[in-house]
Image (cartoon, rainbow, N blue to C red):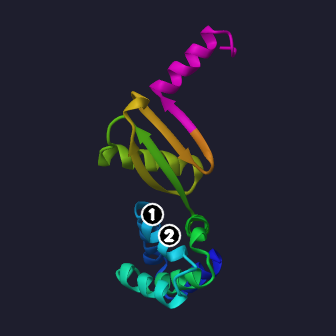
Amino acid sequence: MARALLDVAEKNDDASRVQAGLREALTALRALPELRSALSNPALSVERRQRIVAAVFAPVPELVRRFLDLLVAHEGVGLLELVEQAYSAQWNARRGVVAAQAVTAVPLDEQLSRALEEAIGKTTGLTAELSAETDPSVLGGVLLKMGGHTYDGTVRGRLRALRAVLKGETRS
């Protein structure tokens, strides 16, 4: 499903906008459980649910709206998250991009974001698409999630490791 959507989006030179539209739709469905419920409700006619899609998702690219119509018609709204993930992963692979998420105690400034993207690029040989999140509990440093792996360079992670060593749970 995601591959076919990506193929059509690339053919129309619209892959980036389609990805953004999928993410926007997913965000809306997460934020509005009533919307997800309405679009998944078989008691509402398919036409009525498609009218809801047209009204709510008017700003997203037409290809995304048509795809949402297809999901609604086949009771597949719950698949949207998996499709968005697969779409993004396949599109990133085609472009030589790796998605990475940096979690820090304070927001990353532009210079640090660029430095982290460059370091990821040197390490992986791929262009980094970095998203940032703040979590004061990391205390300091960076928790990097990339390619299904987590790299913990945080103060919190170092304290956990030290605690484990002191308890004799691991070797130093």
Mark 2 packing: few (<14 Cα in 10 Å), some, or many (20+)?
few
Q: In the rendered view, tell whether residue 62 sits above or below residue 27.
A: below
Quadrant of residue 115 within the rendered picture? top left
- Residue shown at 58% from the left, 79% from the top: 42
- Residue shown at 45% from the left, 49% from the top: 118
Q: Does the magenta stretch include residue 155?
A: yes
Quadrant of residue 78 within the rendered picture? bottom right
The Cα–Cα distance between marks 1 and 2, rounded to whole angstroms, is 6 Å
Secondary structure at badge 1 equals helix
**Amino acid identity at mark 2:** Ser
In the drawing, does residue 65 fall left or right of residue 110? Answer: right
In the drawing, does residue 155 fall left or right of residue 151? Answer: left
**Amino acid identity at mark 1:** Pro
Residue 127 point in image, percent of width and height: 51, 58
Which numbered disc covers residue 33?
A: 1
Per the rendered image, the range of residues in magenta is 151-172
Residue 75 point in image, percent of width and height: 61, 78
Task: Answer whether labels 1 and 2 touch (C-beta < 8 Å).
Answer: yes
- Residue shown at 58% from the left, 20% from the top: 161
- Residue shown at 48% from the left, 74% from the top: 38
Residue 53 point in image, percent of width and height: 44, 82
Location of the N terminus (image quadrant) = bottom right
Which numbered disc covers residue 37?
A: 2
Q: Which residue is nearer to you in this view: 28 or 61?
A: 28
Mark 1 packing: few (<14 Cα in 10 Å), some, or many (20+)?
few
